[in-house]
Image: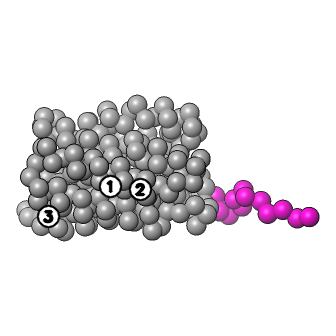
Amino acid sequence: MSQTSTEPDDDQRHGAVEDGMALLSATLFMSLGLVLFQKVGLYTGGTAGLAFLLHYRSGWPLGAIFFAINLPFAWLAWRHLGRAFALRTLAAVGLISALSEATPQWIALDRVAPGYAALAGGVLMGTALLVLFRHRASLGGIGVLALWLQERHGIRAGAFQMGVDVCIVLGALAATDVSRVAWSVLGAVAVNLVLAMNHKPGRYRGLS
């Protein structure tokens, strides 16, 4: 009796160049999405949302806060998702931290409508996470936990992250006005709809 292997064929595996291009594309998308949110004072979920909360309240650099928050999750990635995944994730987190500080020096945004920032920024960040997930990486934090739950227990990463992210954004009600929180919820939904609609078990088997 023949058996169908669940292992990916060689032509389904990503090469080093593909992984590198994915890392660059994803971090550029993510940093631009974060800059759009930051420009109008929006929040998002996950560790980026926590970084925004601390950034708005303290004035500390967003990139440095984001990097520091994500460091503890490196252990989870290393232990449960593999050394290669953990290293790619740390590289992505480091690039995002640097680019989120550098991007405002490279482009000038005089005015951004909150609705546009929420939708465009959310889609950019969701696409960035999708690219990273498909190349065996993430941006740490909740993303690591979401991917681990999907691989081990079949829980959709997008659905899980959407629930967590909405809870975190709602927590921002204590720090800002209702209108900004409402736009932030729209942004969180945009992020996670991209994942929920495109990142499903078995749909994409390319591995790094």
Helix, strand or loop for disc 3: helix
Q: Can residue 98 be seen? A: no
Q: Is residue 114 above or below residue 99?
A: below
Residue 134: percent from left, percent from top: 52, 58
Q: Can residue 88 be seen? A: yes
Q: CA distance from mark 1 to mark 3?
A: 17 Å
For the point 17% across and 55% down, which residue is it?
181
Q: Which mark is residue 30?
A: 1
Q: Earlier in the sequence, mark 1 or mark 2?
A: 1
Residue 2 on the magenta segment: yes
- Marks 1 & 2, CB-CB < 8 Å contact: yes
Q: Which mark is residue 3?
A: none
**Closest to the observer, 160 or 62:** 160
Q: Which residue is mark 3?
A: 114
Density class for disc 1 (Cα within 10 Å; few <14, some 14-19, many ≥20) is: many
Q: Which mark is residue 129?
A: 2
**Label 2 amino acid?**
Leu
**Closest to the observer, 196 or 153:** 153
**Label 3 amino acid?**
Pro
For the point 48% across and 31% down, which residue is it?
75
Q: Is residue 148 left or right of residue 62?
A: right
**Label 1 amino acid?**
Met
Q: Earlier in the sequence, mark 2 or mark 3?
A: 3
For the point 41% across and 56% down, which residue is it?
129
Residue 138: percent from left, percent from top: 45, 48
